[in-house]
Amino acid sequence: MTVTDRASEERLQADLRGAGLRVTAPRLSVLRVVAEHPHAGADEIASAVRERLGSVSTQAVYGVLHALTDAGLLRRVDTGSRAAARYELQSHDNHHHMLCRECGRLEDVPCGVGNAPCLIPEHNHGFEIEVAEVLFRGVCSQCRAAAS
């Protein structure tokens, strides 16, 4: 998916401004890369940003990822200790993820309920529950076929 399919340049700039962030080349580039490569890891994003902008440190890209996540423009998907976190544009559509434990493939899974939170714990311990994130783990069809 290209950034023009997902969000126009003007929309990305408006999103940054709306989140109270300055529009900078690294921030725009990170948003473009994540729009074009959903579920990419930080190192993959950093490499793609460097291809577009030239010399940008990995630490600078990590800083941009954190700022965009904190601002609600990106969603960080924690896939566990073996695999690094992945990033996607924050769509606020309340979807979950499915992770192949063999190849690391990560796919979106629509929420079964449709509105947040999808799950309500038996005991909320006084919390007002806003969202539930679910990560399904298993083996994808390609990895199962390759093992046969």
Image: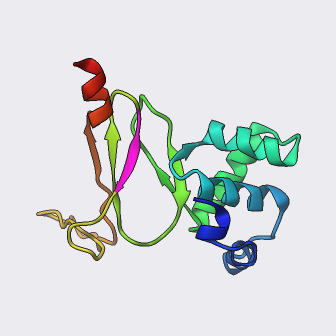
Q: Position of residue 44 (x, y in %)?
A: 64, 38
Q: What colour scheme was applied to this rendering of the protein?
A: rainbow
Q: Position of residue 101 (x, y in %)?
A: 32, 31
Q: Which residue is rendered at x = 48% and y = 70% of the image?
A: 91
Q: Position of residue 38 (x, y in %)?
A: 53, 53
Q: Most prominent secondary structure in the magenta stretch?
A: strand
Q: Which residue is rendered at x = 40% and y = 44% of the image?
A: 106
Look at the picture and state if 63 lies above or below 110: above
Q: Which residue is rendered at x = 34% and y = 27% of the image?
A: 102
The residues colored magenta run 104-108
Look at the picture and state if 141 lies above or below 72: above
Position of the C terminus by quadrant: top left
Asked which quadrant contains residue 46, the reply is top right
Q: Nearer the viewer, residue 109 or 27?
A: 109
**Total numbered badges shown on the rendered structure:** 0
Q: Position of residue 114 (x, y in %)?
A: 26, 75
Residue at the far top in the pictured view: 148
Look at the picture and state if 97 lies above or below 83: below
Q: Is residue 21 magenta?
A: no
Q: Nearer the viewer, residue 59 or 97?
A: 97
Residue 7 placement, left or right of 83: right
Residue at the far right in the pictured view: 55
Look at the picture and state if 13 lies above or below 147: below
Q: Which residue is rendered at x = 30% and y = 22% of the image?
A: 146
Position of the N terminus by quadrant: bottom right
Asked which quadrant contains residue 22, the reply is bottom right
